[in-house]
Every structure is written in C-alpha cells, then in structure tokens.
C-alpha cells in the first residue's frame, strides 16, 4: 500500500497542544501561531491553565509579538 503525500497543514488547538506538552514533557513551552488568522484564534492563558493541570512541571512562557525571552 502506498500513502499519498498530503499537502494539508494542521495547527494544533490548545487542547491538542496541551496534550503534546504532556507527552513531550518539556521544561518550557512557548505557544506560537495563535491569533494570526481568525480560524486559529486561541487564548494562550487558557493553554497555560490546561498545561498547569496536566503537565505541572512545564513552564508556559507567553510572549507578545516581537518579544523575546531567555531560557
């Protein structure tokens, strides 16, 4: 069986991203690409809350556009 190459790009919603964070167990996570288009509007504070519940050892760093941080 041969699989076709897909050209569909997918951005995770906050629930999928929180689950991925739980599975990967990073020390820090920075949400990106939210609110760049109406179809992917998301609340980064809600994501931070979800992560705190399911991956409490992970720090969520929310940056404003153009802002930077040191890890």
Image: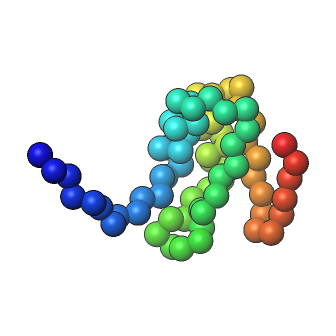
Quadrant into which the C terminus falls:
top right
Q: Is residue 14 left or right of residue 44?
A: left
Q: Residue furthest bottom?
A: 37
Instruction: State the residue lying farthest toward the front.
Output: 2
Question: Is residue 52 visible from the viewing direction of this image?
Answer: no
Which residue is situated farthest in the right direction here? Answer: 70
Q: Position of residue 19 (x, y in %)?
A: 51, 36
> Is residue 49 shown above or below 55?
below
Foreground of the two, 31 or 1: 1
Q: Residue shown at 53%/48% (left/top)?
A: 14
- Image vertical order of residue 16 relative to residue 42, above or below: above
Give the image quarter of residue 6. Answer: bottom left
Residue 59 against residue 8 in the figure, above or below: above
The picture places residue 70, in percent across and down from the top left corner, at 88, 48
Total marks shown come to 0
Residue 40 position, x and y percent, is 50, 65
Residue located at (61% from left, 46% from top): 47
Is residue 44 placed above or below 6 in the rendered structure? Answer: above
């Amino acid at each position: 069986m041969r699989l076709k190459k897909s050209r569909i790009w997918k951005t995770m919603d906050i629930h999928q991203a929180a689950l991925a964070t739980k599975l990967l167990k990073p020390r820090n996570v920075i949400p990106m690409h939210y609110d760049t288009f109406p179809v992917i509007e998301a609340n980064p504070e809600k994501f931070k809350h979800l992560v705190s519940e399911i991956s409490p050892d992970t720090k969520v760093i929310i940056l404003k556009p153009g802002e930077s941080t040191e890890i």
